Image: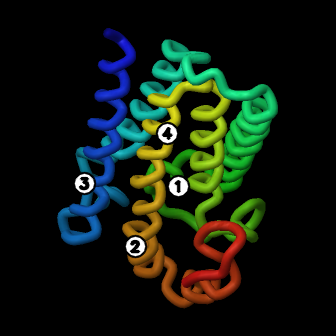
Amino acid sequence: MLIPLFFSLCLLLEGTTALSLVFSRAHPERRIWPPLAGARLRWLMPSLFGATALGIITLGLLDWGSGRLPSWLLAAGIVLWLSGNGLAVWAWAALGLSKTMGGRGILTTHGPYRWSRNPQYVGFILALAGWGVMTSSCSTLIAAIAAWIPLLLVPHVEEPWLEEIYGEAYRNYRTHAPRWLLWKQS
């Protein structure tokens, strides 16, 4: 009973997050993310992402080992999970809490931001994939992959805002750092 409940909750949170991002992209003057100055909903998106992560972690713990994956694949999951979390924490430390939560400041181009404009999201995607495999749970893996959708959408919402704030400095940065990690893309 708990596994279908947490699975459904994860998908609901992921869908809400994705729809909030699509709304923000379509209506930047009333956007939810990045938060408008003084917005009452400034904690909504971080809360949705956090609740989704907690839901996927709980789902994985509840359904641990139900898929019976081979040990070599579980080891690969551990490596992905650890490296993804490490990258996300490094990127968070380089950017800082305020800017991670949509605050303004100096354009960050150091640390992992030298190689990716979105290293936190790259780290989260790797960690989610690793957790889904590591738990050997089909429902967790599906929920983790579904959580990629908002993570793949959010840069498309943030980039026009970043260009508006940082102007030429951000346009120049875009030419040097890829959106993700391994491939160059504007």
Residue 29 at x, y = what percent? 20, 70
Q: Nearer the viewer, mark 1 or mark 3?
A: 3
In three-dimensional space, the C-alpha distance between marks 1 and 3, rounded to whole angstroms, equals 22 Å
Asked where in the image residue 14 lies, by quadrant, the reply is top left
Q: Name the residue under label 2.
A: 161
Q: Name the residue under label 1.
A: 99
CA distance for labels 2 and 3: 18 Å
Mark 4: which secondary structure? helix
Which amino acid lies under the numbered mark 2 shown in the image of this protein?
Answer: Trp
Earlier sequence position, callout 2 versus callout 3: 3
Q: In which quarter of the image is the N terminus?
A: top left
Which quadrant holds residue 159? bottom left
Amino acid type, callout 1: Lys
**Which mark's residue is nearer the viewer, 4 or 1?**
4
Asked whether the residues under the numbered discs 1 and 2 touch, taking CB atoms below 8 Å apart as contact, a structural biologist would say: no
Q: Which of 79 and 90 is in front in this view?
A: 79
Are the residues tagged 3 and 4 within 8 Å (C-beta)? no
Q: Mark 4 points at which residue?
A: 144
Mark 4 Cα shell of 10 Å, populated few (<14), some (14-19), many (≥20): many
Q: Which of marks 4 and 1 is nearer the N terminus?
A: 1
Vertical placement of 63 versus 147: above or below?
above
